[in-house]
Image (cartoon, grey):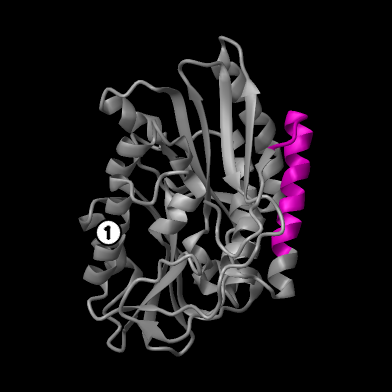
């Protein structure tokens, strides 16, 4: 994998804001995809222990998903904080090629969820296993893709089918909260003019960001070159389109204690691209306000760690680029806003 990049640092805010939800309550047999909640949790009895993070990954791969990472976080939690709250806690990062091929050119913000994230977890001593994911309505709200778009509908169905195949006796939980009005911008976007030698300028930005990422405790579990797959299908829209997943163990650990389904949004993804018909590099990433709003975060430890991470990110961005990001204003309402690691594949870092 190449050096940590602009996208990596930019995303580190994203992932810092990624964790947040409350533990699910009673269950239903139908998906919860209303405006009240875009985060949903699919739970199954696992008394015999036959359902694992690996078997769930296999079901998604069989359904056509590219799984870039499926990281067991219980070891890092125990190592860094001397305590863990789950017998199982995995963060799975995945994407679907046909979704990218069908949507990326017209709706480049789909990169916010390419790859997308899920958490797989079992609380200490429990005999169930759960998978948290974002609903189709949630993807539509953030990316501008119409909720009835055939490719987006197909993505949602593929996720549900994979969950049911992996956990045949599972059900969707009824969440014990509703989304609340956001208190800040939900999406940050920024653009930078570049000259004809944009590769050099991009590399220079990457080098500057590299020096700021590690000291702040962020890691990159996955990187995907989405443009590679467009090129393979003779789609010549972008000079490059990079998608980065970033996480910070301290943030995941803190927020997941009360909000295990936060992994539906963490690690988070930041997109970085340049269209061939313009000399501008675009980037976009969610802010922590999106996660606080969508998951109705109220506990002080989670809020503190999320807002601190955002503050640090904004300072790093200003320091390195000399610019601030342009934020998409939040609507004040009780709903969410509407690799080169080898040819589209990537390992962990």
Quarter occupied by residue 76: bottom right
Q: Give the range drawn in magenta.
A: 305-325
Q: In this view, does 278 lie to the left or right of 64?
A: right
Quarter occupied by residue 253: bottom right
Q: Is residue 303 left or right of residue 23?
A: right
Residue 123 in the image, given as x and y percentages of width and height: 48, 83
User: What is the chief secondary structure element of the magenta stretch?
Assistant: helix
Q: Residue at x 49, y 86 (%)?
A: 124
Residue 78 in the image, given as x and y percentages of width and height: 58, 74
Residue 294 in the image, given as x and y percentages of width and height: 57, 64
Residue receiving disc 1: 157
Q: Nearer the viewer, residue 25 or 58?
A: 25
Residue 236 in sight here: yes
Residue 221 in sight here: no
Say what secondary structure mark 1 lies in.
Answer: helix
Q: Which residue is drawn at 42% across and 48% down?
A: 115
Membership of 55 in magenta stretch = no
Q: In this view, does 77 lie to the left or right of 33?
A: right
Q: Which residue is drawn at 64% across and 70% down?
A: 297
Tally of numbered discs: 1
Residue 49, relative to residue 290: is it above or below?
below
Q: In this view, does 84 lie to the left or right of 217?
A: left
């Amino acid at each position: 994998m190449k050096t940590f990049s602009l996208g990596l640092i930019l995303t580190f805010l994203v992932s810092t804001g990624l964790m947040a939800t409350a533990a699910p309550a009673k269950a239903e047999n139908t998906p919860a995809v209303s405006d009240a909640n875009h985060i949903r949790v699919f739970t199954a009895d696992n008394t015999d222990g036959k359902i694992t993070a690996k078997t769930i990954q296999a079901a998604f791969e069989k359904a056509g998903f590219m799984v870039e990472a499926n990281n067991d976080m219980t070891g890092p939690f125990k190592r860094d904080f001397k305590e863990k709250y789950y017998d199982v806690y995995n963060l799975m990062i995945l994407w679907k090629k046909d979704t990218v091929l069908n949507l990326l050119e017209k709706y480049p913000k789909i990169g916010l969820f390419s790859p997308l994230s899920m958490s797989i977890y079992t609380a200490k001593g429990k005999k169930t296993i759960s998978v948290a994911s974002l609903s189709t309505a949630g993807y539509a709200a953030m990316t501008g893709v119409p909720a009835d778009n055939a490719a987006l509908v197909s993505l949602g169905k593929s996720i549900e089918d994979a969950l049911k195949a992996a956990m045949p006796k599972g059900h969707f939980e009824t969440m014990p909260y509703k989304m609340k009005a956001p208190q800040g911008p939900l999406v940050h976007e920024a653009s930078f003019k570049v000259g004809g030698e944009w590769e050099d300028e991009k590399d220079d930005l990457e080098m500057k960001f590299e020096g700021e990422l590690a000291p702040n405790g962020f890691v990159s579990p996955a990187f995907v070159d989405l443009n590679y797959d467009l090129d393979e299908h003779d789609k010549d829209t972008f000079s490059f389109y990079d998608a980065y997943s970033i996480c910070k163990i301290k943030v995941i650990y803190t927020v997941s204690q009360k909000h295990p389904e936060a992994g539906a949004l963490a690690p988070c993804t930041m997109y970085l691209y340049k269209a061939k018909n313009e000399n501008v590099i675009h980037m976009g990433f969610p802010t922590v306000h999106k996660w606080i709003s969508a998951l109705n975060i109220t506990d002080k430890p989670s809020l503190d760690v999320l807002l601190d991470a955002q503050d640090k990110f904004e300072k790093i961005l200003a320091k390195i680029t000399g610019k601030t990001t342009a934020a998409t204003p939040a609507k004040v309402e009780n709903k969410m806003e509407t690799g080169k690691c080898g040819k589209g594949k990537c390992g962990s870092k």
